Image (tube, helix red, strand yellow):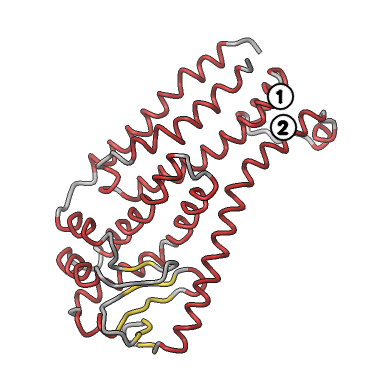
């Protein structure tokens, strides 16, 4: 057995199975959503890199894969003349590794392009049926149901229905707008595209399956936290309650929606951020300790 398989195998198992299992059960994740989002993002990157390294090690014998591990761990790029002298087996291993890495990257690019096209179409429709309100700096749509949403990216704008303008108080409307502008400023659509692309490439992987539903909710909570710098908890919570039944296109971020009830409870029950951060870091450390025996076992074998 090629013992160099052990470290990437351990990293793939911890990032693809163990960390998602811990995250979906962790209370701290919703208390410090930005830290949880960082853990999801790093787990996805680690899994993709580990899967690529596994593919190369499965193809190469132990001595060749040891040289490959030295390149990865030492962060050394092989000289061009070394690349030209690769054997056929080494070229196959390199091609497999790049192919595994290319799958999520290509899926991410495809999802970004699809969402951008959809947002541009919707922005074109808004120019025809909406009107710009310079006082609020939003596009207003004539619709009785209260709704507030934003289109991120190159077509970024905040959209408010006339029903929301008529129903929400000034403080509530300001809170909803602050929430939407937090999505735009944070470029949250990039993380949503990454989660959706990862779920499409690895549909049965717990990291992709759980992350596809957890990441959008955490992004909404992160936007809530940023909005609370400019508004009161009561104003934001009552705005969410009023906008809970509002609808928005798939490529947009809506202030209300099905997650409004969970977010309202979170907003009205403030918590300390210190201890959740420590618990979040302990989750990462626990996953690292789970991989340590495999790395030690690898290092204990002779080269």
Q: Residue at x 36, y 81 (%)?
A: 138
Find residue 205 and report its horizontal and vertical position in percent. 47, 39
Which quarter of the image is occupied by the C terminus?
A: top right
Of the numbered discs in the image, which one, if any, rests on residue 93?
2
Find residue 4 and report its horizontal and vertical position in percent. 61, 21
Q: Badge 1, how many Cα within 10 Å: few under 14, some, many 20+?
A: some
Asked if 300 appears above or below 113 in the picture, the reply is above
Q: Residue at x 65, y 26 (%)?
A: 57
Which quarter of the image is occupied by the N terminus?
A: top right
Q: Badge 2, how many Cα within 10 Å: few under 14, some, many 20+?
A: many
Q: Residue at x 63, y 10 (%)?
A: 302
Report if the CB atoms under discs 1 and 2 are less than 8 Å apart: yes
Q: Earlier in the sequence, mark 1 or mark 2?
A: 1
Query: SS for tag 1?
Result: loop
Of the numbered discs in the image, which one, if any, rests on residue 60?
1
Residue 98 horizontal side relative to residue 168, left or right = right
Residue 271 horizontal side relative to residue 208, left or right = left
Query: SS for tag 2?
Result: helix
Residue 66 horizontal side relative to residue 222, left or right = right
The residue closer to the viewer here, 195 or 68, is 195
């Amino acid at each position: 057995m090629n013992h160099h398989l052990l470290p990437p195998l351990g990293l793939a198992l911890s990032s693809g199975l163990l960390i998602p299992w811990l995250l979906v059960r962790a209370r701290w994740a919703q208390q410090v959503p930005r830290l949880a989002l960082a853990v999801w993002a790093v787990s996805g990157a680690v899994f993709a890199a580990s899967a690529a390294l596994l593919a190369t090690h499965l193809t190469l014998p132990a001595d060749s894969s040891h040289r490959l591990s030295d390149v990865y761990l030492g962060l050394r790029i092989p000289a061009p003349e070394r690349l030209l002298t690769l054997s056929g087996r080494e070229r196959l291993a390199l091609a497999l590794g790049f192919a595994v890495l290319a799958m999520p990257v290509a899926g991410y690019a495809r999802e970004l392009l699809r969402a951008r096209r959809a947002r541009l179409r919707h922005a074109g429709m808004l120019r025809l049926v909406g009107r710009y309100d310079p006082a609020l700096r939003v596009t207003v749509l004539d619709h009785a149901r209260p709704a507030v949403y934003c289109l991120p990216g190159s077509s970024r704008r905040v959209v408010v229905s006339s029903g929301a303008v008529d129903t929400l108080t000034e403080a509530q409307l300001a809170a909803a707008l602050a929430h939407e502008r937090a999505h735009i400023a944070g470029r949250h659509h990039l993380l949503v595209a990454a989660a959706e692309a990862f779920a499409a490439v690895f549909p049965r992987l717990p990291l992709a399956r759980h992350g596809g539903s957890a990441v959008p909710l955490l992004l909404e909570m992160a936007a809530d936290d940023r909005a609370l710098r400019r508004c009161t908890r009561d104003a934001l919570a009552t705005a969410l309650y009023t906008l809970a039944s509002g609808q928005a296109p798939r490529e947009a971020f809506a202030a209300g929606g099905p997650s409004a009830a969970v977010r309202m409870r979170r907003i009205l029950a403030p918590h300390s951020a210190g201890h959740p951060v420590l618990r979040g870091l302990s989750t990462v450390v626990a996953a690292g300790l789970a991989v340590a025996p495999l790395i030690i076992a690898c290092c204990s074998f002779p080269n």
